[in-house]
Amino acid sequence: MPDSSKVLEGLFELGVLLTGSMDAGLAERGLTRARAEVLWNLLRQPGATQRELSQALRCTPRNVTDLVDGLEASGLVARGPHPTDRRATLVRLTRRGQSEVARMQAGYQSLAATLFAEVPPKELAAFASVLEQVIVRLRQSAA
Amino acid sequence: MPDSSKVLEGLFELGVLLTGSMDAGLAERGLTRARAEVLWNLLRQPGATQRELSQALRCTPRNVTDLVDGLEASGLVARGPHPTDRRATLVRLTRRGQSEVARMQAGYQSLAATLFAEVPPKELAAFASVLEQVIVRLRQSAA
DNA sequence: TATTGTTATACTCTATAACTATA
DNA sequence: TATAGTTATAGAGTATAACAATA
């Protein structure tokens, strides 16, 4: 029987390695994790308002202002008017932003394939099952 | 057979939840993750030099200066002279720093116990095994 | 010459509070 | 009155470059 603290330690270590690997890849393309997450969200919520982004990213609206400022300066997103609410601002991916997200997705899938290449499907399924349980458990304890 | 991208996505989600939960606990005690990691390292390397800390934390020496400044101001660590090298500075946990680390350890073990409470030992062992494989794999691809 | 830690400077992420324009 | 986004301000983490003291 493995020590649960050791397993948690492993999860943290993996988290550090994963985010480190991710950040390095992003930095090469002039992106930060926070900005990449904005792009990622815009893929699922095309034309989201900044308010919606702040909710999806669990950060303040003020924070979104700066993140969108940066992405707009890089030409990856564009601000546009809301059709009916003149207070709101819609944020959409530009063509360059879209190809940047596509590149991120490709890198993501490639990483996943590499990481789990030598794990038998049955073990991977069991791993995924425990992972799911732990996520649920953590969500409960956080709420 | 589970989709490896989905599993990786789960790992990322867990990482976000774990660090979020951790950060919230630290914030209550006036700590940040970066500073907590300094304390954590000092537990394993008591009386480390700032240079050694910068290597352990994989950050610049300049960064360590500020982190130690903050912890010193909070009374959690203390700077001292190196016995033989007058350029170097030794950093050690104060008594308050030690009890803070002890509290962190307790919280960590409590979290691990909660998370894996309902996972059978056999499944947990299999989970730990895959986790270990993936960590090794990621270290290889990073190097 | 090389190393340790610091000063100087800069960028990013994050937050709260006050404010403007709009609903 | 309430909401969307911004200006103002602040703190923290991170980095590079130049520098002083020491090895």
Image (spheres, coloured by chain):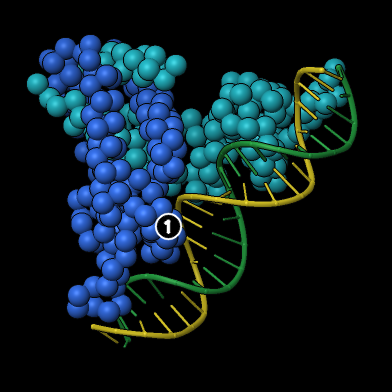
Chain colours: A cyan, B blue, C green, D yellow
Identify the residue at horizontal 38%, vertical 58% (top origin): B72
Q: Residue at x 63, y 20 (%)?
A: A45
In this picture, is A41 found above or below A73?
above
Q: Is residue B102 above or below residue B80?
A: above
Question: Measuring 32% from the left and 61% from the top, which residue is drawn there?
Answer: B78
Please identify the quadrant where the N terminus of chain B is shown: top left
Q: Is A100 in front, or is B138?
A: B138
Q: Position of residue A72 (x, y in %)?
A: 70, 41
On the image, numbered disc 1 is attached to which residue?
B73
Q: Secondary structure at mark 1?
A: helix
Residue A39 lies in what quarter of the image?
top right
The amino acid marked with disc number 1 is Ala
In the image, residue A40 lies at what x, y percent?
55, 29
Neighbour class for label 1 at 10 Å: few (<14), some, many (≥20)? few
Identify whether A43 is placed above or below B80.
above
Relative to B47, A69 lies left or right = right
Q: Is residue A135 left or right of residue B123?
A: right
Residue A110 x %, y %: 38, 32
**Whole-percent x and y of residue A32?**
53, 44
Count of marks overlaid on the render: 1
Task: Examine the image and state in which quarter residue A107 appears.
Answer: top left
Quadrant in the picture for residue B3: top left
